Amino acid sequence: MFENLLTNNLNVNFFEKSNCYAFEIPNFLSDDQYNALYKNFPNIKKNEAHNFNEAFDDKDSQHQLKAFVTEVYPDKYNKLITENPILNEFTQTFKNPKLSDLFIKKFFFKILKSRIFDSKNFLKLLIRKNRSISKKSDSLIDKFLYNDILTTVGLTYMYNGSQAFPHTDGIKKIMSLLLYFPDENVSHETNKNLGATFYDSNEFNLTGFGKNNAQTFKDSENFKKKNKASMTFPFKKKNLYGFIKSHKSWHSVEPFDVHDDFVRKNINMNFLLV
């Protein structure tokens, strides 16, 4: 069902207002592909979500009111994704070296430019050959010749009232890709504000951690007082949204209040330089 994604022409539109290379690929999925994923998205009820996130009930954590289906928890991941024919095919398509090669080649010079202040990884990307892997090799020759690109695919659930603090992502991440699954019963006006928000900030944060990263609710509030939001991804179906990680790829998910039973759903695909 998803084999055509391996030869997609990647008609990319960049958002000029973003502080990094943020982009949209319209109609990345067909109607049939989107509907199949939408119907097979696992239904994780709010009273079950703590099974997918230990911090779900932690009022001091930005990870409260969220659930994650990721490879970090293989048993749950396999049950909900690997054993689901549609989700498994989609996941294996994104892990196919052809697809990661397609994206890396398309965005290579922008990836390289985004790493200009990360001398170690800048040189690695410049000198070595990139290759997609499912498991990192321990071979010294491989480490000398190749940049290993690991693709991860996961599902994120954000329940009403949740948010993600402004951050730039970890240093291993090269690119993040997002597929959104808007609630059909929610208005367009509400949905359009639910995508990732980007900030026009000159604060330098290469690693995604440290003193500049918002780690508490107060940190997040202070960051937003000092830095202006420049744009928000439309929370639209079928389109693929993404951005290239850099020292200033500041983004967040702003707190939302739709209704008590509302769940914001998306699939995250990440390319990691490991």
Image: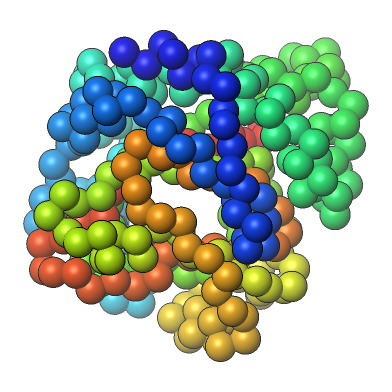
Left or right relative to 194: residue 213: right
Q: Position of residue 20 (x, y in %)?
A: 67, 56
Q: Is residue 58 visible?
A: no
Q: Position of residue 157 (x, y in %)?
A: 27, 51
Q: Is residue 69 above or below residue 132?
A: below
Q: Position of residue 124 (x, y in %)?
A: 84, 33
The residue that appears at 34% across and 72% down in the rendered structure is 255
The residue lying toward the viewer, choosing from 28 and 133, is 28
Q: Quadrant of residue 144?
A: top right
The residue that appears at 41% across and 11% down in the rendered structure is 3
Q: Position of residue 45 (x, y in %)?
A: 11, 51
The residue that appears at 63% across and 63% down in the rendered structure is 17
Q: Quadrant of the N terminus?
A: top left
Q: Quadrant of residue 198?
A: bottom right
Q: Quadrant of the C terminus?
A: top right
The residue lying toward the viewer, choosing from 164 and 230, is 230
Left or right relative to 98: residue 129: right
* Count of number-bearing discs: 0
Q: Is residue 34 visible?
A: yes
Q: Is residue 266 above or below residue 7?
A: below
Left or right relative to 35: residue 192: right
Left or right relative to 121: residue 93: left
Q: How are the residues colored?
A: rainbow
